[in-house]
Amino acid sequence: MNDDSRALFAGSGSSSGSAVRLNVYDLLQQNDWTYWCGVGVFHSGVEVYDTEYAFGGHEYDAPGVFATKPHEAPGQNVAFRESILCGYTDLPREEVHAVVQQLGAQYKGNRYHLLQMNCNHFSSDLCARLTGQPAPSWINRLASIAVSLHCLLPTGWVPPLRPPTAADAAAAAMAEERERRSLLNPLENPGASEQPPRAAPRLIT
């Protein structure tokens, strides 16, 4: 059995493996109304081994897959909603990372499409690779309905989450260092946040 085949059958039905969770975020406030109808505009990422993997769009023919700390999806209008246990994986951390890299060859940033190849498609594929089961269909139901009706949502409604560039990572690192200094020396900046600094997201290549 090759590596790809093993990844497809890496799921574990017991809790002896590592938990694989789907972290779901609201992209629109209207989700509070539509969620109970089984539809909404969501972002999602897959959490395993204390790392969250997700997919976003950019203009380059390069992977659009990136990693963050759990529950810290990039973007100003991204609000965490819930975490769903999708199953367990027997793969060690290094092989999980290899599976994500394999998916990155398919999920290029310039292939991002709001309806046909978005973050939820990636999350479902990664869940299937790791647990043998895809993500719940409701996270992408609105896109599926739109495709079946041959109608396109205006892309301006929900711009894709943009994976971080090197400049973004450097700026985030500088901001994190300033935040850390203010936490260690609150008298220098009495208005500083009391929350711990967020780590910069990183691209998976």
Image (cartoon, rainbow, N blue to C red):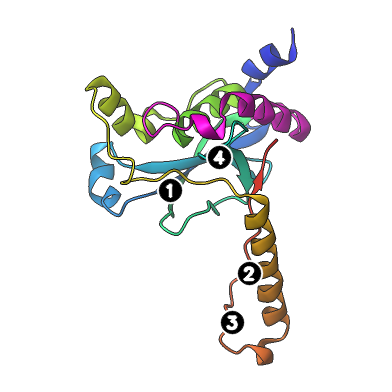
In the rendered image, residue 116 lying in the magenta stretch gets the answer yes
Q: Residue furthest top?
A: 1
- Which amino acid, by three-letter code, is at mark 2? Pro
Q: On the image, numbered disc 2 is attached to which residue?
A: 196
Identify the disc placed on residue 54.
4
- Please identify, in this view, whether the residue under mark 1 or under mark 4 is nearer the observer: 4
N-term-proximal mark, 1 vs 4: 1
Between the C-alphas of marks 1 and 4, the distance is: 12 Å
Closest to the observer: 158 or 120? 158
How many discs mark residues in the rendered view? Answer: 4
Between the C-alphas of marks 3 and 2, the distance is: 11 Å
How crowded is the residue under tag 2: few (<14 C-alpha within 10 Å), some, or many (20+)? few
- Which amino acid, by three-letter code, is at mark 1? Tyr
How crowded is the residue under tag 3: few (<14 C-alpha within 10 Å), some, or many (20+)? some
N-term-proximal mark, 2 vs 4: 4
The answer to whether marks 3 and 2 mark residues whose Cβ atoms lie closer than 8 Å is no
The residue depicted at 45 percent of the width and 59 percent of the height is 76
Which portion, as a residue range, is magenta?
89-117
Q: On the image, numbered disc 1 is attached to which residue?
A: 25
Residue 168: quadrant of the picture: bottom right
| Left or right relative to 93: residue 30 | left
